[in-house]
Amino acid sequence: MGFKCGIVGLPNVGKSTLFNALTQTAAAQAANYPFCTIDPNVGDVAVPDARLAKLAAIAGSAEIVPTRITFVDIAGLVRGASKGEGLGNQFLANIREVDAIAHVVRCFEDGDVTHVEGRIDPVGDAETVETELMLADLDSLERRIVPLEKKAKSGEKEAKAQLALMMKAADLLRQGRPAREAALLQEEREPFRQLGLLTQKPVLYVCNVDEASAAHGNAHTARVEEKARREGAGCVVISARIEEEVAQLPHGEQEEFLMHLGLDEPGLNRLIRAGYALLGLVTFFTAGPKEARAWTVTSGARAPQAAGVIHTDFEKGFIRAETIAYADYISSNGEAGAREAGKFRLEGKDYVVSDGDVMHFRFGG
């Protein structure tokens, strides 16, 4: 399953530096985690997960294959992008293709790096970008609503249902609120997603700070974190400059460099995990002599859907899922021990996959 997280932001906030660090980190992982650059502005990176190495050691796996998330470095945005200013049209087209938005905001002072609007105000920057997205969404909806109203008046049920969803979004946008705040019934969620609205996508705020603020943040990041809490959005503090330096160091020197700065891991690890969590994803594993592998499903997915991620035939012919919780697999030293301890389970088609499940699927032709 491919999941895309778009990196957006105003010019000179550190967006490209962050993306470059991501791609360099991924390239450095190439021994175990193959990296591919699909386009110059797209990076496919491994989701860090320490559980994989432990599973591989117990299962005697020859290879470790992590789950992955794609980051897209989207063209820089300026005020007026919704009307085509700057690279506005390209920006809007690219952002429609991603599943979530990593919104980089500048939380550092540096007289040598000019701000496009002449001030350091990360919350204001975030609102500028959000406003452009809301204006673009409203314009898109208003152009679609008029012809749909005619169909709805003629009695078309589908048109009425779609119009009602569009009006929910349009009413919010006219109030200056993003479409993701819409109160939706369960059965409305997928049709609403298919409207393709930019402000319906979940947001992760990435606070780009100076070196001194990398461990604990600063006054700017505190404001962004409060905004994220109010919105139910994600938020991570990261120094793009530090991450770029770390990515260029030999692996053995990275930990010492980070410890010197008071950091226990690269900020990019937290960013990748936060992007993964933002998309509402969980990981399950397969482990054997050939490989220990992480797989991605959306939270709430049932066993046949998980089987289908591995191969569509597995879902079609699903019979049972042999399942061991990760903690039980480790404490029992593998599948045989888990069976002896009574921790090995056979789950049916209604089983909801839990994060960390170690699974093997039985299926028929």
Image (spheres, rainbow, N blue to C red):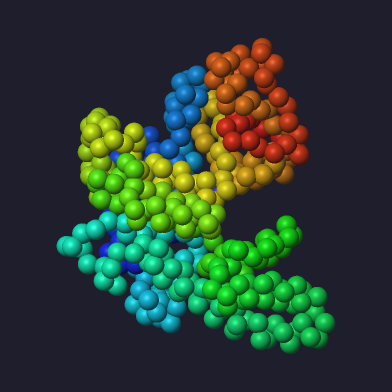
Q: How many marks?
A: 0
Residue 203 percent across, percent down from the top left:
49, 58
Q: Please, is residue 195 above or below residue 234 in the view? A: below
Quarter of the image containing the C terminus?
top right
Residue 39 percent across, percent down from the top left:
37, 59
- The answer to which of 175 and 180 lies nearer the viewer is 175
Q: Is residue 42 visible?
A: no
Residue 269 percent across, percent down from the top left:
39, 41
Residue 266 percent across, percent down from the top left:
33, 40
- The answer to which of 259 and 156 lies nearer the viewer is 259
Which residue does the image show at 48% across and 29% down from the upper left?
Answer: 51
The quadrant holding residue 155 is bottom right
- The answer to which of 363 and 241 lies nearer the viewer is 241
The quadrant holding residue 359 is top right
Q: Left of 348 or right of it: where is 59?
A: left
Q: Left of 146 or right of it: where is 246?
A: left
Q: Is residue 310 visible?
A: yes
Specify the farthest residue to the left. 112
Q: Left of 361 or right of it: where is 5?
A: left
Which residue does the image show at 51% across and 34% down from the upper left?
Answer: 293
Specify the farthest residue to the right. 155
Which residue does the image show at 81% across and 86% down from the upper left?
Answer: 154
Which residue does the image show at 32% across and 59% down from the upper left?
Answer: 106
